[in-house]
Image (cartoon, rainbow, N blue to C red):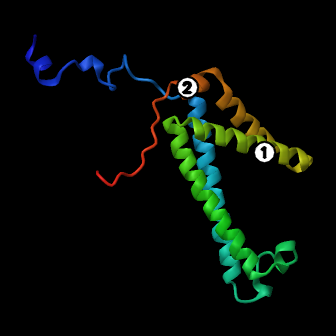
Amino acid sequence: MSDWYAIRGNASALPTDPKNMRFRPLGVSIVGLLVRIAAVWQLAVGIFCISEALTSSQASRLFKGQYLGSVSDGYLWFAGLVAIAFGLILWRVAATLVEGDPAARIFVVALAVLNIIFALLSFPWGIAGMIINLLVVFLLSSSSSVRWFADSKFEAKRPSAFE
């Protein structure tokens, strides 16, 4: 037995050993990036709605002449806060998705299917969103992604009072 083995133990059992490493599929990384982009977009929309609600006069609003031009400030506050909350939820889902959480995968696939349905209801204008969401469903349903989520050792890291 060498001194290294006595000091460090069996190095081939470490998760950093290339024989023991499991790499995340590229499709999961792409979907994680798309979900993060969607989260940033939701946060920006929420901030924009709240800034419009803070605008003092109805005449100076950017939505002038559109449906949102005549909406009350309370509605814009509510829509902005909901968009910000949803953006924060999406940011957390993206973080757990790339870590291998199967629940995050189910949430993202369900959200993509719902977006595909809404894109079909607004057919000519929803084609780009439908294509992106079909890509998300395809990437998360590929055999390598399904295998990676099934084999992942994801554990919910809940705060403990004893740590």
Residue 23 lies, in percent from the top left, at: 47, 26
* Residue picked out by circle 1: 114
Asked if residue 107 lies left or right of residue 64, the reply is left
Residue at the front extreme? 162
Residue 84 lies, in percent from the top left, at: 62, 64
Quadrant occupied by the N terminus: top left
Asked if residue 154 lies left or right of residue 35, the reply is left
Residue drawn at x 57%, y 35% is 102
Disc 2 packing (10 Å; few <14; some 14–19; many ≥20):
few
Residue at the top extreme? 1
Q: Quadrant of residue 15?
A: top left
* Residue picked out by circle 2: 150
Task: Classify 92 as above or below 8.
Answer: below
Name the amino acid type tagged 1: Leu
Which of marks 2 and 1 precedes in the sequence? 1
Residue drawn at x 57%, y 47% is 93
Residue in the foreground of this view, choosing between 92 and 16: 92
Q: CA distance from mark 1 to mark 2?
A: 24 Å
Name the amino acid type tagged 2: Ala
Mark 2 secondary-structure assignment: helix
Residue in the foreground of this view, choosing between 137 and 37: 137
Mark 1 secondary-structure assignment: helix
Residue drawn at x 22%, y 18% is 10
Q: Quadrant of residue 65?
A: bottom right
Q: Quadrant of residue 108?
A: top right
Q: Can the viewer see residue 23 in this picture?
A: yes
Task: Classify 66 as above or below 135.
Answer: below
Asked if residue 92 lies left or right of residue 7, the reply is right
Tag 1–tag 2 contact (CB < 8 Å): no
Residue 136 lies, in percent from the top left, at: 69, 36
Q: Which mark is residue 60?
A: none
Residue in the foreground of this view, choosing between 60 and 101: 101
